[in-house]
Image: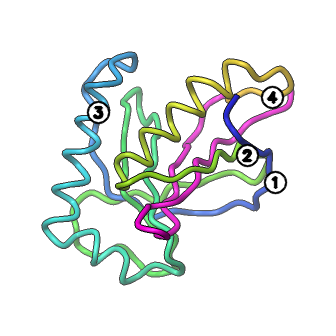
């Protein structure tokens, strides 16, 4: 099983800019391509740098959330500032409570995101006996780089069974 911990987190807010994912939720290749294309465009046109400039820390969030029966995907940061003019923004509320935290690293942010999602949703949650994910936003948190690799965590709110 993947290396993970359960951790209590205070309520926190992420300012995110996103896109609707059109692939079926079981089409991992399609979803990964949509997410990768979104990040590439968001990074190349300077919007990610603008977002980072108002962040309260160095973390970059890739958030998955169901909104009005749509699968949404956001690039976001923790911030106290108001939203810059980058397109559609959303304040994403993460609840206080217990979170499944899966740590990892990858050659790129994309690889990190795909690896952590695969471990969390493909291994840890299906095998979990004491806790379950019941919905709400979840995020891959890119925390930095070391030894040429991007490292971070996936944060998924869970409840005890």
Label 4 vs label 2: CA separation?
Answer: 10 Å
Q: Tag 2, which secondary structure?
A: strand
User: x and y percent of residue 146 in the render?
Assistant: 49, 70
How many numbered badges does the structure rendering display? 4
- Quadrant including the C terminus: top right
Sequence-first tag of 2 and 1: 1
User: x and y percent of residue 35 in the render?
Assistant: 29, 42
* Front in this rendered view, residue 112 or 37: 112
CB within 8 Å, label 4 to label 3: no
Of discs 3 and 2, which sits in the foreground? 2
Judging by the rendered image, the residue that carries numbered circle 4 is 131
Main secondary structure of the magenta stretch: strand
Quadrant in the picture for residue 81: bottom left
Q: Dot 4: within a 10 Å radius of its alpha carbon, few (fewer than 14), some, or many (20 or more) residues?
A: some
Judging by the rendered image, the residue that carries numbered circle 3 is 21
Q: Tag 4, which secondary structure?
A: strand
């Amino acid at each position: 099983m993947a290396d993970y911990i359960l951790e209590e987190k205070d309520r926190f807010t992420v300012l995110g800019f996103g896109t609707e994912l059109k692939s079926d939720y079981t089409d991992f290749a399609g979803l990964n391509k949509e997410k990768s294309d979104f990040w590439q465009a968001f990074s190349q046109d300077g919007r990610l740098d603008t977002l980072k400039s108002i962040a309260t820390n160095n973390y970059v969030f890739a958030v998955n959330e169901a909104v009005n029966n749509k699968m949404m995907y956001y690039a976001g940061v923790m911030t106290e500032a108001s939203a810059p003019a980058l397109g559609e923004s959303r304040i994403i509320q993460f609840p206080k409570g217990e979170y499944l935290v899966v740590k990892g690293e990858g050659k790129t942010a994309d690889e990190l995101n795909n690896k952590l999602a695969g471990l969390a949703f493909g291994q840890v949650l299906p095998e979990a006996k004491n806790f379950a994910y019941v919905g709400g936003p979840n995020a891959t948190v890119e925390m930095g780089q070391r030894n040429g690799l991007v490292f971070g965590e996936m944060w998924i709110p869970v409840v005890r069974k």
